[in-house]
Image (cartoon, rainbow, N blue to C red):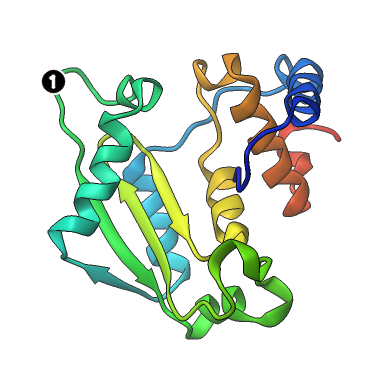
Amino acid sequence: MITREPTKEMLAEWRAIWSCYKDRIRPNRKTGAQVLEYLQARYPLTEIFDPEARQVIAYNVTMNEFLAQKLPAGAAPDPRAFYLENAGEGSRFYLPQNRDDASLWGDDVQKIFVGVDLASGFYLVEGSTLLWDELCAFQGVDEKDLQKCVIVAQYIGALRRLNAMDRIGGQ
Protein backbone atom coordinates (compact mmCIF):
# COMPACT_ATOMS: atom_id res chain seq x y z
CA MET A 1 0.00 0.00 0.00
CA ILE A 2 1.49 3.31 -1.01
CA THR A 3 1.10 5.68 1.92
CA ARG A 4 3.27 8.60 0.87
CA GLU A 5 4.45 10.47 -2.20
CA PRO A 6 6.84 8.19 -4.12
CA THR A 7 10.44 9.34 -4.35
CA LYS A 8 12.91 8.66 -7.15
CA GLU A 9 14.57 6.13 -4.86
CA MET A 10 11.27 4.32 -4.27
CA LEU A 11 10.58 4.19 -8.01
CA ALA A 12 14.06 2.79 -8.65
CA GLU A 13 13.51 0.13 -5.97
CA TRP A 14 10.10 -0.80 -7.44
CA ARG A 15 11.65 -1.13 -10.91
CA ALA A 16 14.38 -3.38 -9.51
CA ILE A 17 11.82 -5.58 -7.74
CA TRP A 18 9.75 -5.74 -10.93
CA SER A 19 12.79 -6.73 -12.99
CA CYS A 20 13.64 -9.49 -10.53
CA TYR A 21 10.15 -10.97 -10.18
CA LYS A 22 8.05 -10.13 -13.26
CA ASP A 23 8.99 -13.33 -15.09
CA ARG A 24 8.68 -15.54 -12.00
CA ILE A 25 5.14 -14.58 -11.07
CA ARG A 26 2.27 -16.36 -12.75
CA PRO A 27 -1.06 -14.58 -13.18
CA ASN A 28 -3.30 -15.68 -10.31
CA ARG A 29 -5.64 -12.74 -9.69
CA LYS A 30 -8.78 -13.42 -7.71
CA THR A 31 -12.10 -11.73 -8.49
CA GLY A 32 -13.85 -9.18 -6.33
CA ALA A 33 -16.30 -11.87 -5.23
CA GLN A 34 -13.39 -14.11 -4.17
CA VAL A 35 -11.80 -11.24 -2.20
CA LEU A 36 -15.10 -10.61 -0.43
CA GLU A 37 -15.61 -14.32 0.28
CA TYR A 38 -12.09 -14.45 1.74
CA LEU A 39 -12.83 -11.51 4.03
CA GLN A 40 -16.22 -12.82 5.13
CA ALA A 41 -14.83 -16.28 5.90
CA ARG A 42 -12.09 -14.90 8.15
CA TYR A 43 -13.23 -11.69 9.79
CA PRO A 44 -16.33 -10.18 11.37
CA LEU A 45 -17.62 -7.50 9.01
CA THR A 46 -20.50 -5.08 9.31
CA GLU A 47 -21.85 -4.03 5.94
CA ILE A 48 -22.33 -0.32 5.33
CA PHE A 49 -25.22 0.61 3.08
CA ASP A 50 -24.31 4.31 2.91
CA PRO A 51 -24.53 5.36 -0.77
CA GLU A 52 -21.63 7.81 -0.34
CA ALA A 53 -19.31 5.08 0.97
CA ARG A 54 -20.20 2.87 -1.97
CA GLN A 55 -19.78 5.76 -4.39
CA VAL A 56 -16.22 6.33 -3.15
CA ILE A 57 -15.39 2.73 -4.05
CA ALA A 58 -17.04 3.04 -7.47
CA TYR A 59 -15.25 6.32 -8.21
CA ASN A 60 -11.90 4.74 -7.38
CA VAL A 61 -12.57 2.31 -10.20
CA THR A 62 -14.15 4.59 -12.79
CA MET A 63 -11.77 7.51 -12.28
CA ASN A 64 -8.67 5.34 -12.70
CA GLU A 65 -8.14 4.20 -16.28
CA PHE A 66 -6.15 1.13 -15.30
CA LEU A 67 -8.77 -0.04 -12.80
CA ALA A 68 -11.65 0.79 -15.14
CA GLN A 69 -10.12 -1.61 -17.68
CA LYS A 70 -10.66 -4.42 -15.18
CA LEU A 71 -14.43 -3.99 -15.45
CA PRO A 72 -16.08 -6.57 -17.71
CA ALA A 73 -17.28 -5.09 -21.02
CA GLY A 74 -20.34 -2.93 -20.43
CA ALA A 75 -20.29 -3.49 -16.66
CA ALA A 76 -20.48 -0.83 -13.98
CA PRO A 77 -18.83 -1.08 -10.58
CA ASP A 78 -20.67 -3.14 -7.96
CA PRO A 79 -19.27 -1.72 -4.72
CA ARG A 80 -19.71 -3.14 -1.23
CA ALA A 81 -18.57 -1.37 1.94
CA PHE A 82 -17.83 -2.75 5.39
CA TYR A 83 -16.31 -2.09 8.76
CA LEU A 84 -13.92 -4.76 9.96
CA GLU A 85 -14.94 -5.28 13.57
CA ASN A 86 -12.56 -5.32 16.51
CA ALA A 87 -13.73 -8.81 17.45
CA GLY A 88 -12.73 -12.39 16.79
CA GLU A 89 -9.96 -12.70 14.21
CA GLY A 90 -10.49 -9.06 13.20
CA SER A 91 -9.18 -7.87 16.56
CA ARG A 92 -5.59 -8.63 15.53
CA PHE A 93 -5.65 -5.62 13.20
CA TYR A 94 -6.45 -3.37 16.17
CA LEU A 95 -3.61 -4.65 18.37
CA PRO A 96 -0.89 -2.08 19.09
CA GLN A 97 1.85 -4.19 17.46
CA ASN A 98 -0.15 -4.36 14.21
CA ARG A 99 -1.17 -0.72 14.05
CA ASP A 100 0.30 1.62 11.52
CA ASP A 101 2.20 4.79 12.28
CA ALA A 102 -0.20 7.26 13.92
CA SER A 103 0.68 9.87 11.29
CA LEU A 104 -1.05 7.70 8.68
CA TRP A 105 -4.53 7.19 10.19
CA GLY A 106 -4.45 9.24 13.40
CA ASP A 107 -3.74 8.24 16.96
CA ASP A 108 -6.57 5.78 17.50
CA VAL A 109 -8.23 3.78 14.73
CA GLN A 110 -11.73 2.96 15.98
CA LYS A 111 -12.98 1.28 12.79
CA ILE A 112 -11.23 -0.19 9.78
CA PHE A 113 -13.09 0.53 6.56
CA VAL A 114 -12.99 -2.02 3.75
CA GLY A 115 -14.43 -1.56 0.28
CA VAL A 116 -14.61 -4.19 -2.44
CA ASP A 117 -15.85 -3.74 -5.98
CA LEU A 118 -17.28 -7.06 -7.07
CA ALA A 119 -17.13 -6.17 -10.79
CA SER A 120 -13.47 -5.12 -11.11
CA GLY A 121 -11.86 -6.77 -8.10
CA PHE A 122 -10.67 -3.44 -6.71
CA TYR A 123 -10.47 -3.21 -2.93
CA LEU A 124 -9.50 -0.47 -0.52
CA VAL A 125 -8.70 -0.44 3.17
CA GLU A 126 -8.56 2.56 5.46
CA GLY A 127 -7.12 1.97 8.90
CA SER A 128 -4.76 -0.98 8.38
CA THR A 129 -1.95 -1.46 5.91
CA LEU A 130 -1.57 -4.99 7.30
CA LEU A 131 -5.07 -5.92 6.11
CA TRP A 132 -4.42 -4.23 2.76
CA ASP A 133 -1.24 -6.30 2.37
CA GLU A 134 -3.11 -9.47 3.28
CA LEU A 135 -5.71 -8.76 0.58
CA CYS A 136 -2.99 -7.88 -1.93
CA ALA A 137 -1.19 -11.16 -1.28
CA PHE A 138 -4.46 -13.11 -1.47
CA GLN A 139 -5.76 -11.45 -4.63
CA GLY A 140 -2.58 -11.83 -6.65
CA VAL A 141 -1.98 -10.24 -10.03
CA ASP A 142 -3.14 -10.64 -13.61
CA GLU A 143 -1.20 -10.29 -16.86
CA LYS A 144 -1.82 -6.54 -17.08
CA ASP A 145 -0.69 -6.07 -13.47
CA LEU A 146 2.58 -7.83 -14.28
CA GLN A 147 3.39 -5.03 -16.72
CA LYS A 148 3.28 -2.42 -13.93
CA CYS A 149 6.34 -2.17 -11.71
CA VAL A 150 4.44 -0.52 -8.86
CA ILE A 151 1.81 -3.27 -8.71
CA VAL A 152 4.41 -6.04 -8.80
CA ALA A 153 6.46 -4.29 -6.10
CA GLN A 154 3.37 -3.91 -3.90
CA TYR A 155 2.51 -7.58 -4.39
CA ILE A 156 6.05 -8.70 -3.53
CA GLY A 157 6.09 -6.34 -0.54
CA ALA A 158 2.82 -7.83 0.71
CA LEU A 159 4.10 -11.39 0.27
CA ARG A 160 7.29 -10.50 2.16
CA ARG A 161 5.38 -8.84 4.99
CA LEU A 162 3.21 -11.95 5.37
CA ASN A 163 6.16 -14.36 5.00
CA ALA A 164 4.44 -15.84 1.94
CA MET A 165 7.14 -15.63 -0.73
CA ASP A 166 6.75 -19.38 -1.26
CA ARG A 167 3.65 -18.50 -3.30
CA ILE A 168 5.95 -17.52 -6.16
CA GLY A 169 8.62 -20.09 -5.55
CA GLY A 170 11.40 -18.09 -3.93
CA GLN A 171 12.59 -14.93 -2.32
Q: Position of residue 79 (x, y in %)?
A: 23, 48
In the rendered image, the vertical position of residue 25 relative to residue 44, given as above or below: above
Q: Position of residue 64 (x, y in %)?
A: 35, 27
Comparing 65 with 41, the one in front is 65
Q: Is residue 127 left or right of residue 32?
A: right
Residue name at image x 30 percent, y 25 percent: 68
* Count of marks overlaid on the render: 1
Q: Amino acid at mark 1?
A: Gly
In the rendered image, the vertical position of residue 56 relative to residue 89, given as above or below: above
Q: Is residue 35 left or right of residue 22?
A: left
In this view, the residue farthest toward the right is: 171
Q: Is residue 52 left or right of residue 121?
A: left
Residue underneath mark 1: 74
Q: Position of residue 38 (x, y in %)?
A: 44, 56
Indicate the quadrant where residue 70 lies.
top left
Comparing 15 with 39, the one in front is 15
In this view, the residue farthest toward the bottom is: 87
Residue name at image x 47 percent, y 68 percent: 42
Indicate the quadrant where residue 41 lies.
bottom left
Indicate the quadrant where residue 81 lies.
bottom left
Q: How many neighbours does mark 1 have within 10 angstroms: few (below 14), some (14-19), or many (20 or more)?
A: few
In the rendered image, the vertical position of residue 166 relative to residue 106, given as above or below: above
Residue name at image x 62 percent, y 22 percent: 26
Q: Quarter holding the C terminus?
A: top right
Q: Position of residue 18 (x, y in %)?
A: 73, 21
**SS state under label 1:** loop
Comparing 163 with 169, the one in front is 163
